[in-house]
Image: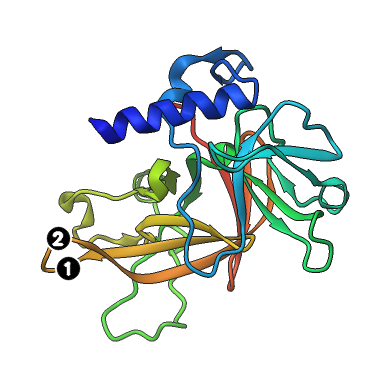
Amino acid sequence: MKRTFFILFSLVLLLAACGISGNRNGDGQTSGDSLSQEPIARQLEGDSTIYGLACEGSNDSILVILKSVDSDPDTIDILNARINRRVYGRPEIGDQVAITMDAEKKSVADIVINIDRLKGEWCYQVMPRLRRRAGAGADSAVQLPPDFPDSLRQKWFQPREYGFEIRRDNTVRPIGIRNEAERQPGPVEYPTLKRYRQWHVYNGHLLLSETRRDTLGNQQVVSTDTADIVFMRRDTLQLRFADQERGYYRRSN
């Protein structure tokens, strides 16, 4: 109870310092829902990213941010980042932002990520392929016969929606997990779904981690994929992984 009160009180001070009376909804209006949000993302060890809330006075050239309750707003030059198309999600007053600074110019931003725009459900569609016979090599081709009935083709080859929901508190909800009945062997198989459970921004990169509970019930990271944001718009996200580049669309609630 005391922690909840402290968070709410801190948010009131943060919002007041930035000249914000509430959080915006999708239409740009404000509401009191912002008081339920934690102001700053959790930071990993070794991460030099600057986190804060975008404040009044920000524009296309500069970003005014408040990093903590007991600090004054800082002004950061984001013109080069915008010219280089490395401002991902236009910051608006009250948005949580993550900023990677230029290595040589300490007051100039290299990358700006709007964390509030990053949050949400991001999806893509996948199609199945025919299941290989037991003992067949991974590179063996499996093709349908020319006279394969269209009715069976329509029944078996249905797209599925995969993806993830980026949530508050650096947690992730996988999208596309199927129940046991749908996992039974059949004539087709779908790609393996990455079951991300955690996310972090780390020096301009997006880290997506799969976790597993240990014997004490704590989540332990078992693997992490590193992605670079190629671009991010209100309803579109493009991520570049080590082995592929993938586009996502934002799923409406």
Tell me what residue is drawn at x 47 percent, y 83 percent.
Answer: 139
Q: Is residue 69 above or below residue 190?
A: above
Q: Residue 41: x percent and y percent?
A: 49, 47
Residue at the far front in the pictured view: 70
Q: Does residue 47 appear to the left or right of 199 in the view shown?
A: right
Element type at mark 2: loop
Q: Residue 10: x percent and y percent?
A: 45, 31
Quadrant of res 90: top right
Q: Does residue 190 appear to the left or right of 229 in the view shown?
A: left
The residue that disc 1 covers is 214
Mark 2 and mark 1 residues within 8 Å of each other at the beta carbon: yes
What's the residue type where badge 1 is placed?
Answer: Asp
Tell me what residue is drawn at x 39 percent, y 86 percent.
Answer: 137
Tell me what residue is drawn at x 87 percent, y 52 percent.
Answer: 80
What's the residue type where badge 2 is placed?
Answer: Gly
Q: Residue 79: x percent and y percent?
A: 87, 46
Looking at the rendered image, the quarter that the N terminus falls into is: top left
Residue 85 is tagged as none
The residue that disc 2 covers is 217
Q: Residue 3: x percent and y percent?
A: 29, 36
As measured in the structure, the alpha-carbon distance from the residue carrying label 2 to the one carrying label 1 is 5 Å
